[in-house]
Image (cartoon, grey):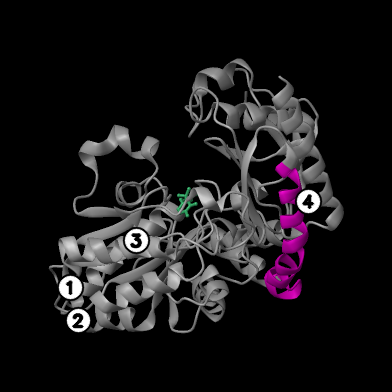
Amino acid sequence: MSSSNRTNIPNSLNEHWMPFTDNKTFKKNPRLITDAKGVYLTNHQGKKMIDASSGLFCNPLGHGRKEITEAVSKQLDKLDYCQPFNQGYGGSFELATRIAKKTPEGINRIFYTICGSTAVETAIKIAIAYHRAKGDSKRFRFVGRERGYHGMNIGATTVGGMINNVKTFASVLMPGVQHMRHTHLPEHKFVKGQPDTGVEMAEDLERIAMNFGGENIAACIVEPIAGSTGTLVPPKGYLKRIREICDKHGILLIFDEVITGWGRTGSAFASQEFGVTPDMITMAKATTNGVIPMGVVAVKEEMYDAVLDSSKNPEGTPELFHGYTYSGIPAAVAAGLAVQDIFDKEDIFNRAKEMSPYFQDGLHSLKDLKEVVSIRGYGMMGGVEMKMKDKPGKSGFQTFKHCYDAGVNFKNTGDTLIIAPQFICEKKHIDEIIDKLRTGISNYSKS
Ligand SMILES: Cc1ncc(COP(=O)(O)O)c(C=O)c1O
């Protein structure tokens, strides 16, 4: 089949090895998405579904935004690609300035990557490069957190803490990585917003510093709200305490805001929402409204200065030997700039903030459903945890399928349903998501 006569159903499903997918089951009964517009998706059977997870936290501005597709198309006509090393093009600088206006003060140097995983990998390398630039080359350790998700490269996999993602690859993981315990505490069941209890979990970082020498730790990386493990909202005071411990030991703090970045909490970044400033912020997904891959690391200016100032490399030789063929490519930048325009024009972060209580109330109204064992949420993200059946992941996947049939689309992570509506949702859309979740979850419990 050529690209010009492609149909909704391909001739063969065999060749494509799908990511994070049960390929065997999927290929017997595929779910193919053919169209997307606004808050709705259509599948290959012509069924319309409401998108309850913004793709994968990617499209808060809705699907098929003309402003973005036209900007990309115009850019491709003018300049489709230029190699990004020791030369550049104007748009990437313009976007960096726009991003730096919204990041917390001082975190204003922008390194482009290809996705969230490469943003995390880059942040890990920048941490090492910065310490070396300061003459502190013994810092090689990193601290992550159980149930953390930071992507799938080796570094990102290692600092992550989701067992299925690491166990097969244990032999090739990065050395010197420790994990704090997660904050998924039993008393946080059905807690709306930040839990009052659990701040003491931050002391795990102090213990690790005591056990391994804080002076050997390069950086600590956390998602301000753990997203892929089903929305674990930080206990009150937790992130602030992590920052204090980092400061005490000279450890850099990286906030992985690939999910929480760009308004998901109601502020541009969770850092601002929770009043805690890290040294680096990673982002991806909503940076381009998901339409073209792009990752970003926003770095403290003084770190950038330290790396550049310490370089004794001859003219024309990079200060940091790191970068990607697709770092800040024109099409992704064009999408990013169009997204920034929409953020500003539609006051999108405030829109998310204003809709959050309505969404959270709706989500928590599902508490009475039989198989629901916990609901958590903050801003425009939430997790509905289903009772485990035989093995982890089974009830989550079965519920996902019932909800898909009921006309609401999202991703399950283990036994938790990831619900993260688009910021353009009106109350009627939130109502539709909640109603269809109720139907899908109820149908699952009856099955
Ligand atoms: C917090 C976080 N970091 C990193 C990543 C990896 O991003 P990508 O899949 O774009 O590599 C994800 C993906 O979901 C994420 O949620």
* Nearest to N terminus: mark 1 or mark 2: 1
Q: Report crowding for label 4: few under 14, some 14 to 19, many 20 or more residues within 10 A (C-alpha).
A: some
On residue 122, the disc is 3
Q: Are marks 1 and 2 in contact (CB under 8 Å)?
A: yes
* Nearest to N terminus: mark 3 or mark 4: 4
* Residue placed under numbered mark 4 in the picture: 38
Q: Are marks 4 and 2 in contact (CB under 8 Å)?
A: no
* Residue placed under numbered mark 1 in the picture: 132
Residue 321 appears anywhere in the view: no
Rounded to the nearest angstrom, the CA distance separating label 4 from label 1 is 47 Å
* Nearest to N terminus: mark 4 or mark 2: 4
Rounded to the nearest angstrom, the CA distance separating label 1 from label 2 is 9 Å
Q: Is residue 366 left or right of residue 244?
A: right
* Three-letter code for the amino acid on which mark 2 is drawn: Ser
* Local secondary structure at mark 2: helix
Q: Residue at x 68, y 23 (%)?
A: 9
Rounded to the nearest angstrom, the CA distance separating label 3 from label 2 is 19 Å
* Nearest to N terminus: mark 3 or mark 2: 3
The residue segment tinted magenta is 342-367
Rounded to the nearest angstrom, the CA distance separating label 3 from label 4 is 33 Å
Task: Tell me the quadrant of the picture where the C terminus can be found.
Answer: top right
* Residue placed under numbered mark 2 in the picture: 310
* Three-letter code for the amino acid on which mark 3 is drawn: Thr
Rounded to the nearest angstrom, the CA distance separating label 4 from label 2 is 49 Å
